[in-house]
Amino acid sequence: MENIDWKNLGFGYIKTPKRYVSNYKDGSWDTGCLTEDGTVALCESAGVLQYAQTIFEGLKAYRTVDGRLVTFRPDLNAARMVESARRLVMPPFPEQQFVDAILQTVRANADYVPPYGTGASFYLRPFMFGTDAVLGVAPATEFQFRVFGTPAGPYFRGGAKPISIRVTDYDRAAPHGTGHIKAGLNYAMSLYAIEEAHKLGFTENLYLDSATRTYVEETGGANFIFITKDGKLVTPKSDTILPSVCRRSLMHVAAYILGMEVEERHITLDEVRDMAECGLCGTAAVLSPVGRIHDHGKDILLPSGMEKMGPVCQELYDTLTGIQYGRIEGPEGWIREVEL
């Protein structure tokens, strides 16, 4: 295992020895292979550079309490990437080949997967982009799929402290647009808003639906869950938010392991004032508690407060991370072991 200060890792890129690459040309994907080359050479008129034809995924590998090397639900990332590809007129990468690429990348970089107990994990970034030259507005015809991994510390050092977010006037995604897929362009258009939020002292933006500006959607990079005062988990239902793997997993944990009532539905901003807890869920942080939502001069203060994660969110977080790190037996198929 590499000589790295695992307990003091940040959440950033560290180059590892191997990454996976596959190319699409003449109507099919090649078999793919591992390479040491972390650079990408492109034509100046490549589709990804001219018209942002690129999609990506994010998932993690872990060292479990009993020493196994595992990944968490890579099949769902594979399926979501297929949907992203179809929407941006890109050739879907075969789902089984996707999972195999993940396993190969983890196996080849096993020495960079942080030890159990450090709070760190091995973050994996599969991505795909148009590589051949385009000038007129049209999809590329050649593509590259890559996976790299990097050891990453916990998203929040010292524990997940509740954050402050603001209701933004910017729109994240339009009806019938691309909000439901993991396209690079979605994140590019959120950068201005997040920089503005940071300057104003907020960690994130709460985006409302762009059609009516009534319903809660998501932040720039995470889904919402709310806990009602009677202990129900509710989460926004919308065709313009990304179907988070983490959110779906938390909903399953709530319903089938913790015995909670779970509901996916439209949630108005006015309803949020009566919620007991709020959290942002995603691969990087798993579950980030929200203590304050600033809405144009008025604050929504969650009863769970600004000192620590609320009790229900804490139980959800502990259960899901317990499954990921092998402390708790999870549903069949959630954990995919990497054979060394």
Image (spheres, helix red, strand yellow):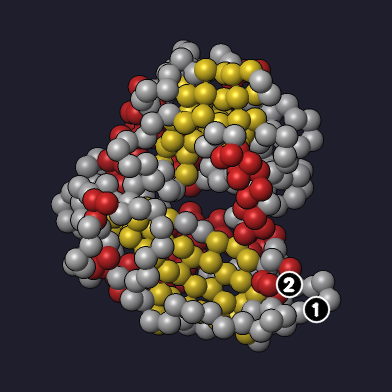
Tell me whether the residue at label 2 lies in contact with that at label 1, contact meaning CB atoms closer than 8 angstroms: yes
Horizontally, is 269 left or right of 175 in the view? left
Horizontally, is 18 left or right of 126 in the view? left
Horizontally, is 16 left or right of 238 in the view? left
SS class, disc 2:
helix
Q: Quadrant of residue 130?
A: bottom right
| Camera-side residue of 41 and 321 | 41
| Camera-side residue of 89 and 298 | 298
User: Percent from the top left, x then y, of residue 67?
Assistant: 17, 56
The residue drawn where x is 72% and y is 39% is 170
Outermost residue, bottom side: 26
Label 1: which residue? 135
Q: Which mark is residue 50?
A: 2
User: Looking at the picture, which amino acid does disc 1 mark?
Assistant: Leu
User: Percent from the top left, x then y, of residue 208?
Assistant: 69, 33
User: Does 224 sit above or below residue 33?
Assistant: above
User: Percent from the top left, x then y, of residue 36?
Assistant: 38, 81
